[in-house]
Image (cartoon, rainbow, N blue to C red):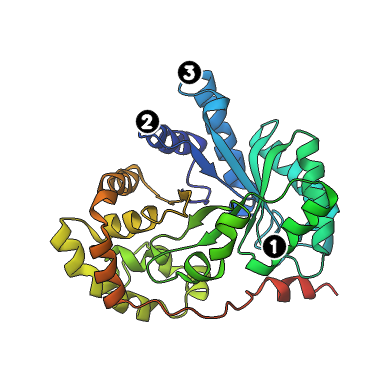
Amino acid sequence: MDNSDKYTADAWYDMMKLAFEHGINFFDNAEVYGTGLAEKNMGAAINRGIAEGTWSREDLVITTKIFFGSKTYGLESGPNSQGLSRKHVIEGTKASLKRLEQDYVDVIFCHRPDPYTPIEETVRAMNFVINQGWAFYWGTSQWSAAEIIEACEIADRLGLIRPVVEQTVYNILHRNKVEFEYLDLYKKYKLGLTTWSPLAYGALTGKYSAGTPEGSRMESPLFKSWSPDFAQRVAKADKLRPVAEKLGLSMVELALAWCVSNENVSTVMIGAKTLTQLEQNLKAIEAVAKITPEVKAEIDALLPFVPELSMPDGTAMMRSQHL
């Protein structure tokens, strides 16, 4: 769902209701999305669904993420309103719950690693949040395997709750963390995955093959900055078109079903803007059975996966501006 102010709480409710009617009960958010507006809209939609008997709170798995603050990805936030210090984890969680109009979330994520806060401080802070009844579980997002292992070992040493899930990018064009870096964590720590960007910012939809459509997210300078190699990704994605056509699938259905077919992926998150887009995405559920080992091998031959060392993202630079 888009985070701009043209999407009302009623629009959020309609989207969530359609998803719920198709068996989806996991809805994710973050303090920074729409500078807090996304949490407000989703909270209002949740409460409307409860009031109208569409769902009960127990039916839903609601998550949010803490790190960037509720301003524009930390660019305007002060040092105390971002990161994973005990102060921001606790204050940020309380602010998120207030916007959501909920007593608790099911899972609260550390939206990025914080190189300027000891991991032990974050582990203790997340356990405080759980002990207050503000969340049932905690997880990480875009952390390295080494950081997740350190958090788990600290939690074990202190008798605290480990992070139980990682939220990372995963798609046919971006496979490194899920298929290489995290491999030892699934069995050793029973790590779950909620993955995002299954369509690679739209590169895997097929709609960018003839250029950037008017009104698409790649007209946004923010999204362009996140994917500077977008044109090359589109060119790679176009190689998959014959595979999709042979299976009788759209490019979107192929990309989403491929993600779901990975046994280590607990949840594939989608971000439809309209009910029509959501309906198209939901068709991927029926397509998963078509993603056989032979189809995966064909995709691998077209777009070979080569493991590489992960590079830190730019959040460390964002945090360092205050030091």
- Determine which residue is flagged by label 1: 149
- Determine which residue is flagged by label 2: 21
Is residue 119 or residue 319 the one in the foreground? Answer: 119
User: CA–CA distance between discs 3 and 2?
Assistant: 13 Å
**Residue 209 visible in this rendered orientation of the protein:** no
Q: Position of residue 53 (x, y in %)?
A: 48, 18
The residue under the point 58% across, 77% down is 310
Number of other residues with Cα within 10 Å of mark 1, as a class: few under 14, some 14 to 19, many 20 or more: some
Three-letter residue code for mark 3: Gly
**Compared with residue 116, is residue 259 higher up or lower down, i.e. above or below?**
above
Left or right of 40? Residue 294 is left
- Determine which residue is flagged by label 3: 53
User: Nearer the N terminus, badge 3 or badge 1?
Assistant: 3
Task: Count how many numbered circles sit on residues in the image.
Answer: 3
Left or right of 242? Residue 70 is right
* SS assignment at label 1: helix
Residue 229: quadrant of the picture: bottom left
Residue 153: quadrant of the picture: bottom right
Seen as rendered, the residue at the extreme front is 188
